[in-house]
Amino acid sequence: MPSLSGLLRAAGAIVTPLACTGAFAITVEVGPDGRYATIQAGIDAVVSAGGGDVLVESAYYPENPVLDIDDIAVGVHGGYDAGFQPAGLPTLVALGDGNGDSWRVLTRGAHGHAFVGGFSLYGAAGHPGAYLQARDASYLSFQYNQVSDNHHDAVTQDYVYGGGIEAEAHDSAWVELVADEVRDNSVSARDYAFGGGVSLHAFDAGRITAEQLDVHDNALTYAGQACYGAGLAALAGQYGAADVDLTDLTISGNGESCGSQAVGHAGGLYAASADLAAPHGVHTNRIRIVGNTVSGSSGSSESVYLEARGGAIDFSDALVVGGNDRGLYASDYRAPHFFVENVTVARNGGAGLRLDGDVQLTNTLSAQNGQPDQVQENWLVLRSLLGLTDARFVDAAAGDYHLRADSPAIDAGTNFTPHGLQTADLDGHPRPYDGGVADGGCYESSYVRDRIFANGFETSP
């Protein structure tokens, strides 16, 4: 697991100040060697000046910062050394010592741009570690942060969202999360709990994108009625064609233990795309989930639960493995389209797959799971291999789910999928390989055929 300092050094440019233009844009320095002693004081100075950048020295800050902007651009950058040069050093924000509230970032207006990056946020109680809300065509970017040990445990509230991060996008606004690590957070609620690690909700033509997140060891600990997504919960809806994109995420070791009265949904990833009828016509909410890994989920529910309630879902090039119960549960209620393509579901304790409704399953591999798949004669299953007892993975016990040269999944797919074949596999290699036929599952095998025998051992040089 990379450290925050390693992430920051690898990021490089994320500690470069935001390009804030305008007559009143300024740069201020916060820390033991800066002009301002607290992050909040630096934020307030920049906001009062009409925008700019806050450079934060690597240190310990017991506070709950609030960045609330309307039609101005503000960047808050951690990771600076005593001379306020970018050094990729972690900057610690102890939310618990600041009364346990969140770091809140609120943006409004078409010129409202916020950036927060390079911080370690921990210790919130009764709130998520970071609460992000963008409205009115604004833009909010949250990058290269570590969000850990926050506990949004609010059992007096009916609905509770996000133990580590709770993000909302409204009114054509965009929230972007990039390369954040979210670990050891939790959520509980009186009735419904969502997103032990991360909760994402796009409304009213809003857009949320999340890429390269590492979401691990988060929990849903209690809910009186139901809980959703111990690692990450994503919702697209309601009015205005809202969109959520999840790309290149690693979701591992998360779990739900929601109580005997609650219905648990997804120890790893939960995604729901809602129906809607806007005042000026019908629009489509959509969730795109491409190139992700969900592993080691615990609890008495599936690792991944996809629920299309009138909205669209695209789920492709994913690895769903090693869960305590079912692997992938896909449930369709009047969806305009619901595609599952080039997915590997393996070594889960329960059924690999459960499909309800018109889910279009293509080029998917379900193998070595604890119980038979539950597909119920779905005529939309195309060129997929279900219920294999031996898919001949390279070394599944060690976590390597690439295909051996003698795997029955090789060339078992189709290049003519209802959704249009994704052009890259989970490794980023072209699909299909060398103009051939797509393989079943999330990996194209041709990259290992020349160096691995059928028994999984490498060839000699």
Image (tube, rainbow, N blue to C red):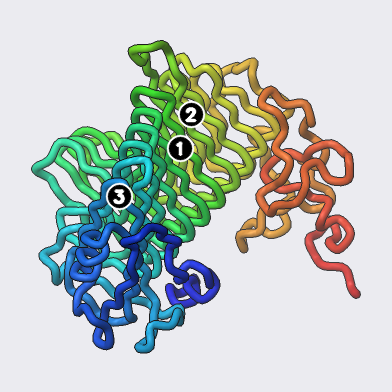
Q: Residue at x 70, y 33 (%)?
A: 363
Q: As shown in the figure, which amino acid type bears the numbered disc 1?
A: Val
Asked which secondary structure carries label 3, the reply is strand
Which residue was labeled with disc 3? 132
- Say what amino acid the circle numbered 2 marks: Arg
Q: Which residue is mark 1?
A: 244
The residue beneath circle 2 is 286
Residue 195 to residue 83: above or below: above
Label 3 – label 1 distance at C-alpha? 15 Å
Residue 114 screen position, x and y as percent: 36, 54
Q: Quadrant of residue 461?
A: bottom right
Between 51 and 364, the residue placed more toward the observer is 51
Q: Earlier in the sequence, mark 2 or mark 3?
A: 3
Residue 450 visible? The answer is yes
Q: Report x, y in % for residue 4.
A: 43, 73
Residue 293 or 384: which is nearer the viewer? 293
Q: Residue at x 61, y 59 (%)?
A: 399
Say which mark, if any, is on residue 303. Answer: none
Quadrant position of residue 275? top left
- Crowd tier of the residue under label 3, counting other residues whose Cα lies within 10 Å: few below 14, some 14–19, many 20 or above: many
